[in-house]
Amino acid sequence: MDARLQESRDLPLAVDLDGTLIATDLLWETIFLALKTNPLIVFLLPIWALAGKARLKLELARRVTLDVSRLPYRQDFLDYLRAERASGRTIVLATAAAEPLAQAVAAHLRIFSKVFATRDGINLASAAKASALVNEYGEYGFDYAGNDRADLAIFDRARNAVVVAPDRAASRFQQAHDTMHFDAPRTSFKTYLKMLRVHQWLKNLLVFAPAVLAHDFLIAETMFSATLAFFAFSASASAIYIINDIIDLPLDRVHPRKRHRPFASGALSIPFGLSCSAALLAIAAAICFFQPPMFAAIIAVYIVSTTAYSLAIKRMLLLDVICLAGLYALRLLGGKLAANIPMSFWLMAFALFFFLSLAFLKRYVELQNSGAPEQSRIAGRGYRPEDIGIVGQSGVSSGFTAALVLALYINSDVVGNLYSEPWLIWPLVPIVLYINMRVWVLAHRREMNDDPVVFIALDWRSQIFIAIGAVLLIAAGMV
């Protein structure tokens, strides 16, 4: 064996946790986990923070239950640590995370001989961590693996450094000293699109529906206002999706597909997500300055409602699907206000029942895929597996009610004033029934995506029937 390699292995290897061993920060994770458990903790956070970071971390750690087995460990680095441990090397965990969390990680991985962590009055970060390691092993008596600027003080007092997924400062150190390093997976443009959930922006195309149905889609000013409304809703939606993904990290990590989301996988950091969310909300607010005042009120209601949905409503039986249907109605209402189009009772009634059906469908699919035992709620929801029958019946009934509302609308005096040949739009009723019932049949066959609105928008058969409906609407108004 190479003498230098043997000499290195004779030294203990101290390993940082946040950002190094795991691709996340436990302080941020415990903040949101605690807020999810009890939102009133938001008032205690400043008090704990003023008492010092150590107090903040420990108070949070005492109030949360974190499943450390689901954390996004850096697998290549963890494999290296296990190989070093197998060769007889002493591996210790040296982290600024709260001691209860660090001990939980150590108990799960079973590779650490000792744990250095934040405890009462001591935030074990940077210089404090360096002093603790030097007191235990002596100057240059250990190797250290870290990832960011705070670790430079420890690198300087360690025999050798191992740089893992480095930030800019740690990367410069690694290049200057030619140390061992483990690079983080490269973040692609697709990762940022996933963070924003750009595919969900398809739902916001509903803001154009009022202008189209009022036959104002050829008026440039109206369409420009509707386009601004589209981006305001999209920016707001993405901002809340980011917050929702951060809040739902523990649930996402046990989901076979959602565990690959940017924050659950550790591809993007929580502080970065919060910064992006704030920027998106600022964009939405800026757009509101160019819209009628009531549009700004609708955006505010939308943001508050989606936040409430993320924090609590989505776990409430039946209120969740009513809230989802209401959010779709808000998009239509926002489109009307932006384009300065009079309110339509018929459109709002149809939308509420149609999107209530799709909201029930979303829960129906989740119940199919939950795997939860009878009498137990599915993760993060207020439903149990035995509810699937009534959920399906409610959803199908809502879809037929939407078609009935449409039929009554076509037979009303309002249609006679808008369309010269109202009989041409009667086929819209079977078209709506076909689209709605088809997704329900596919769901029953377990062939449905868990977001039916996006499925309908991307499904070529649905697109054909939507196009036929649009042609009939235009023809009925021109004949």
Image: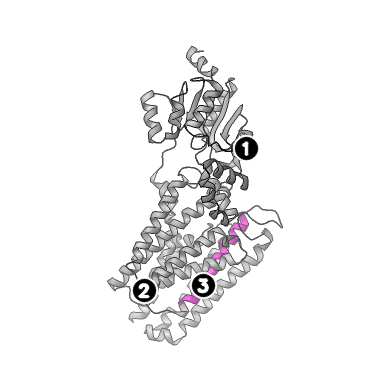
Q: Residue 104 carries which label?
A: 1
Q: How far apart are marks 2 and 1 (CA)?
A: 57 Å
Q: Which portion, as a residue range, is magenta?
A: 347-370
Q: Residue at x 41, y 47 (%)?
A: 190
Q: State yes or no: residue 365 in magenta.
A: yes
- Is residue 330 depicted above or below 54 in this figure? below
Secondary structure mostly seen in the magenta stretch: helix
Q: Residue at x 51, y 55 (%)?
A: 244
Q: Which badge, 2 or 3, is on the more N-terminal residue?
A: 2
Q: Mark 3 points at which residue?
A: 352
Q: Position of residue 451 (x, y in %)?
A: 51, 59
Kindly check if marks 2 and 1 are in contact, taking CB atoms under 8 A apart as contact. no
Q: Nearer the viewer, residue 309 or 339?
A: 309
Mark 2 neighbour density, 10 Å: few (under 14) some (14–19) many (20 or more): many
Q: Which badge, 3 or 1, is on the more N-terminal residue?
A: 1
Q: Position of residue 107 (x, y in %)?
A: 64, 34
Q: State yes or no: residue 94 in magenta.
A: no
Local SS, label 1:
helix
Residue type at tag 2: Ala
Q: Mark 2 points at which residue?
A: 211
Q: Which residue is drawn at 62% across and 57% down?
A: 368
Q: Position of residue 30 (x, y in %)?
A: 56, 46
